[in-house]
Image: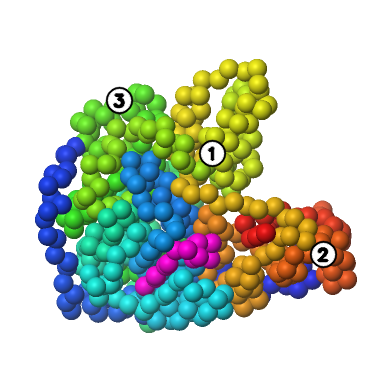
Amino acid sequence: MDTQTKEPSKNTSNEVYKENKENNHNESQQIISAPPHQKSADQEEIDALKDSYDDFLYVSKAFSNCAINSLIAKARLYGLNPAPINGARVLELGSSCGGNIIPQALYNPEATFTGIDLSPVQIKHGNELIKSIGLTNITLLEKDIMDIDDDFGTFDYIIVHGIWSWVPDIVKDKILSICNRNLSDRGIAYVSYNTYPGWKRLEQIRDIMLYSETQAKKDSLQERTIYTKNVLKLIAETMKMDDEIQKQSGYKIDNINRVLQSNNYYVAHEYLETFNDPVYVAQFIERAEHQGCVYIGDARLEKSFITWLDDSIVDNIKVLSNNDYKAKEQYYDFVYDTQFRMALLTKQCNADAIVRNETVEKDILESIYYCGPAEDRLGTPNGWTDPLHQTIKYFMNTKQLFTIEDIQKYIEEHYPNETFDMNKLYVRLFHLSILNHLNAYGENYECLPFVENVSYIPERFINYVSTLIEGNGKQYMTLGNMFNQEDASVDEGLLYVMKQMAKPISRAELITILDETLTITRTRNGETFTVPSEQYLDESIQHITALGYFRQ
């Protein structure tokens, strides 16, 4: 593990939790009225919800499934033609401090981002971070979702992550209305939510915590969270004392342990908030349609493209669903006990373009950029020994974007005497994308290499890392890369190297600077040693290249 000469700032709040009925297309002529903003019995609870987020700060994360580049690719795979990144207008409802859209604004200066949140405290912190970074294409607003109307404008992408299940019904419907009325004609909305039947298992945990917290009513949310986690710990220990109970309810012990291992702010807002209302996927689709939206499919493709399953399973689900795409996804959830979903929605004018038969045209697959995931725990199969699969494996291991054309050129160059069934390549990449062994993106983001006396790092990237590392911004949000994936390994040492690259510089000059000013020590097998400047520089350059910070 790297140990820098300066210890990074530490703060307890700095932790980050690890973790067929056919549409009537004539409905596009209907006028769907937005739910009115009226004070209701829920208003007091909404205010309490706002106060809970002000009082117990939720670290704002970057979520890869919310990256608009990823949404573009998935929309294409479903048959749609979403707006390009260049000029795109993006809205996030419930943006918190902006951790989910600030990295996207950083990497996509040609797009504009707007985040709204009810919490003035989180909006204040987020705007301070944006000012420190120097971004001008992102705005965070303290605003009630219920106050958004047609005059707020239209957006090409609307992101609603971790909000829908945690608000009262009137706000749920308003969110879905916004995903229709405030979406552009080519627009894509993303809405995540807790779902049954999987969440029925977790409701037991929530019920225990809500019951036990009555013993600590006057305590703060943070104190109640600690108290109820201790209750869960004692319950799990008690269950383990009875072999029969442990055998019958091992899943409950496992669920309790996952809660105990999660950060307190996540547990507080996931299990102790007033609202946490899971629904079945069929119910969600019906509510979305009632607000004028059209359901596209799930952002996790395997929940909508089920043909990756064994043929016998697919056959049974088809019998159960009777050729109804909504029923197909609902029966999938019944079989696989789904507890979380990420719905993609669009407007009625796009209903006819959505492909429901789980096929994709070749030209769509050719338009996609693929990348091996940062962590592929299953890895590639051992049987991948033929040249085609070896080539796919090679590109996956680079962790950089590639296309079908890149694979074809590589095969022609390295296997000139081989004959390939290129249909097999299309099928394999599509299959890997469905199973999340490959991430799919709609547009290229080139990771330029370091070139001596040519490469430099733009000020906005240095300011971004500096704001999080030196400015202690990590207590408010995580660092996201070009794919909106978290990168927790960026530290003061890397930032120091980045600052030396604000202008083109030679490798020799960099090594001299590191020799004179920076000492890197590491510990291995209990022994501490100094890392040579040359080695640390090469590691840093590789990391900066992967982050996509270099420009020429």
Residue 315 marker: 3
Position of the N terminus by quadrant: bottom right
Name which of mark 1 and mark 2 comes first in the sequence.
1
Dot 2: few (<14), some (14–19), or many (≥20) neighbours within 10 Å? Answer: some
Question: From mark 1 to mark 2, how far is it between C-alphas?
Answer: 34 Å
Question: From mark 3 to mark 2, how far is it between C-alphas?
Answer: 61 Å
Q: Amino acid at mark 3?
A: Asp
Residue drawn 62% across the image and 18% down it: 418
Name which of mark 1 and mark 3 comes first in the sequence.
3
Q: Amino acid at mark 2?
A: Leu
Query: Is residue 202 within the magenta segment?
Result: no
| Side of 513 relative to 16 (left or right) | right
- SS type, badge 3: helix
Above or below 341: residue 112: below
Q: Which residue is mark 1?
A: 403
Q: Amino acid at mark 1?
A: Thr
- Dots 1 and 3: beta carbons under 8 Å? no
- Dots 3 and 2: beta carbons under 8 Å? no
Asked whether residue 416 appears in the rendered view, the answer is yes
| Side of 213 relative to 69 (left or right) | left
**Number of residue marks:** 3
Asked whether residue 269 appears in the rendered view, the answer is no
Residue 510 marker: 2
Front residue of 43/478: it is 478
